[in-house]
Image (cartoon, rainbow, N blue to C red):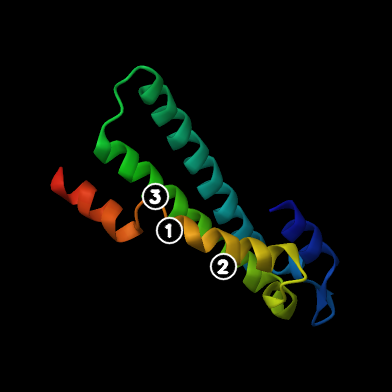
């Protein structure tokens, strides 16, 4: 996140920094909000786990929400880096590629949805 903020504050487009565009700031605000939501959820469920009260459905909710939020956030940050965000020499591109597996191992997002739906 910080690398993206630093980048958009330096990168110029159409005579101003990318940071100067309201859309950029709003996208980063949304990413920050999602990151806080993920942290709060995970902290809550870790507490439940430590008290031996975490259910299978709750753990599926946490994994699904956190990994999907990470994917969306990294996709937005790659977009904010433009072409550089797609080049593996840059940390954002590597993070994007590396994070994709989180929605697969430990149970795919579809498996998490199935586990959650069984409890509905």
Residue beneath label 3, please? 106
Residue at the image position 39 percent from the left and 50 percent from the top: 106
Q: Nearer the viewer, residue 28 or 50?
A: 50
Residue beneath label 1, please? 103
Q: Say if mark 2 contacts mark 1, CB within 8 Å.
A: no
Instruction: Look at the numbered disc 1 and give the secondary structure of its residue.
Output: helix
In this picture, residue 69 sits left or right of residue 59: right
- Disc 1: CA contacts within 10 A as few (<14), some (14-19) or many (>=20): many
Res. 67 in view: yes
In the rendered image, which quarter is residue 17 located in?
bottom right
- Disc 2: CA contacts within 10 A as few (<14), some (14-19) or many (>=20): some
Question: Residue 38: x percent and y percent?
Answer: 48, 42
Please determine whether, in this image, residue 55 is positioned above or below residue 89: above
Q: Earlier in the sequence, mark 3 or mark 2?
A: 2
Instruction: Look at the numbered disc 2 and give the secondary structure of its residue.
Output: helix
Instruction: Look at the numbered disc 3 and give the secondary structure of its residue.
Output: loop
Question: Residue 36: x percent and y percent?
Answer: 54, 41
Q: Nearer the viewer, mark 3 or mark 1?
A: 3
Residue at the image position 85 percent from the left and 80 percent from the top: 15
In this picture, residue 33 sits left or right of residue 112: right
Question: Residue 6: x percent and y percent?
Answer: 80, 58
Res. 72 in view: no
Q: Nearer the viewer, residue 91 or 32?
A: 91
Q: Nearer the viewer, residue 94 or 73?
A: 94
Q: Earlier in the sequence, mark 2 or mark 1?
A: 2
Q: Say if mark 3 contacts mark 2, CB within 8 Å.
A: no
In the rendered image, which quarter is residue 12 located in?
bottom right
């Amino acid at each position: 996140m910080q690398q993206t903020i630093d980048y958009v504050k330096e990168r110029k487009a159409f005579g101003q920094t990318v940071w100067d565009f309201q859309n950029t700031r709003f996208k980063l605000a949304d990413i920050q909000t999602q990151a806080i939501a993920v942290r709060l959820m995970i902290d809550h469920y870790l507490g439940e786990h430590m008290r031996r009260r975490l259910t299978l459905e709750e753990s599926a909710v946490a994994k699904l929400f956190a990994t999907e939020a990470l994917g969306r956030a990294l996709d937005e940050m790659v977009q904010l880096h433009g072409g550089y965000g797609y080049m593996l020499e840059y940390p954002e591109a590597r993070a994007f590629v590396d994070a994709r597996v989180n929605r697969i191992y430990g149970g795919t997002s579809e498996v998490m949805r199935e586990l959650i739906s069984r409890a509905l």
